[in-house]
Image (cartoon, rainbow, N blue to C red):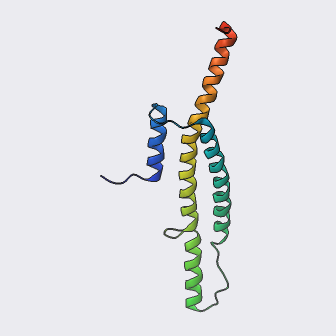
Amino acid sequence: MAAETLIEYWTNLATAADEGQLFLDPRAAMDCDKACAVYIENLVENRRRAMNLADVRGMGSFESGIALARKFSLKADGGTNNLVDVLQSHIDVVTAMQTVFRKFFDATETTDQDNGSLIGQEGPR
């Protein structure tokens, strides 16, 4: 059996949370969500900067300089295992993580709202 990807792993955790097989304190989930948001911002900024690195110049006019500039440009964006794509894969994983964490405090907020509505309609017991 092939090892699951990180996206599949976090998707499976989201399913487990939906099915009530995974539990996390809502406050801890909220802290994790905030950490994910900060990390995603950092990754997005670094991805933007990496895109700017894709046009390397100044390596000279010899064949070797032109080839080296092309190699560095492709390492930043467009080549195999380039920085832009790697950063995007990290963004995708952290976004999947954030989805799992949000299930715990979103569910708590929904339950609190539902309970509040019931108390408002029926009065306290």
Q: Position of residue 66 (x, y in %)?
A: 59, 85
For the C terminus, the quadrant is top right
The answer to which quarter of the image holds residue 64 is bottom right
Q: Find residue 87 and report its image quarter.
A: bottom right
Considering only vertical position in the picture, is 116 above or below 98? above
> Relative to the observer, which residue lies in front, 37 or 92?
37
Q: Is residue 97 above or below residue 108?
A: below
Outermost residue toward the left in this view: 1
Residue at point 60% right, 82% down? 69
Query: What residue do we see at 63% from left, 40% from top?
Result: 30
Of residues 23 and 85, the one drawn nearer to the viewer in this rendering: 23
Q: Is residue 54 left or right of residue 3?
A: right
Measuring from the top left, give residue 83's x and y in whole percent.
Answer: 57, 67
x 63%, y 38%: residue: 27
Residue 101 image-quadrant placement: top right
Residue 82 pos. (x, y %)? 54, 68
Q: Residue furthest bottom?
A: 62
Residue at 63 percent of width and 18 percent of height: 115
Across the whole image, how many numbered discs are drawn on residues? Answer: 0
Looking at the image, residue 22 sits to the left or right of residue 101; the answer is left
Percent position (x, y) of residue 39? 64, 55
